[in-house]
Image (cartoon, helix red, strand yellow):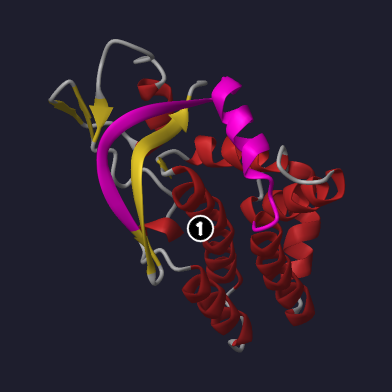
Amino acid sequence: MIVVDGIEIMIPNDKLDEVVSIFKSGVHIDDLEGWQTEAAHEEENFEKFITEAREFSNMSPPDIDQFEIKARGAASICVVEFFLKHFGILIKSNKAKSSLMEVICFGLSSKQAVQVIDIWMKAEKSDPNYYENYYDSCMTKEGREATLDSINEMAAIFDKADLVLIEAELKIMTSVTLRDVKKDTRKIGNYSYDYSRIAFSSSL
């Protein structure tokens, strides 16, 4: 559900980006709760996702599907928490999340940027060229551990990002729309972050 100028509108999850992108100006859109991945509907906690992913990995036989969901959730939370912590922005769209992950790369070295994009694509399975190799890697315990290690490494790399460069890119990007909203708080793990802007995809 979204609220447009006080009017509630029910929209299927797979159509939210498309519909919201129509309202580029002149209207106020808020109350976009639930516009996230399956994993993100759960408690937003990076360590919890990593721990549960490892538990599914260690099962006999391992639950590959649940492992992938938890690993994807951990990668997703890295991006969400980064923008809450440093810019007071709550990401409300999966497309926006991917676009903003790329914005983070503007604040990284070329080597770091390539590394986090590789990790993100594998975790999100957003690039079909990665999927077969990624799935094959998940079929071995060593491969699954390597996936979790890389996601942990991505979180550490984000901490080294140049926030000034990222802020500059946020001001000129066109792939994501930022809207001012009433100040609120979102909890991620043991931390609470204030936000006054939301982000969603500008493109269909």
Residue drawn at the location 52% of the way across and 74% of the way down: 47
Which residue occupies the foreground of this view, 31 or 72? Answer: 31
Percent of width and height locating residue 185: 29, 52
Which residue occupies the foreground of this view, 81 or 63? Answer: 81
Specify whether residue 139 is in view: no
Residue 32 located left or right of residue 191 = left
**Disc 1 marks which residue?**
77
Residue 25 located left or right of residue 95 = left
Instruction: Give the quadrant of residue 160.
Output: bottom right
Specify start and end residues of the magenta stretch as a single range.
159-186
Q: Residue furthest top?
A: 26
In the image, residue 176 lies in the stretch drawn in magenta: yes
Helix, strand or loop status at disc 1: helix
Q: Amino acid at mark 1?
A: Ile
Percent of width and height locating residue 55: 55, 84
Residue drawn at the location 58% of the way across and 71% of the way down: 67
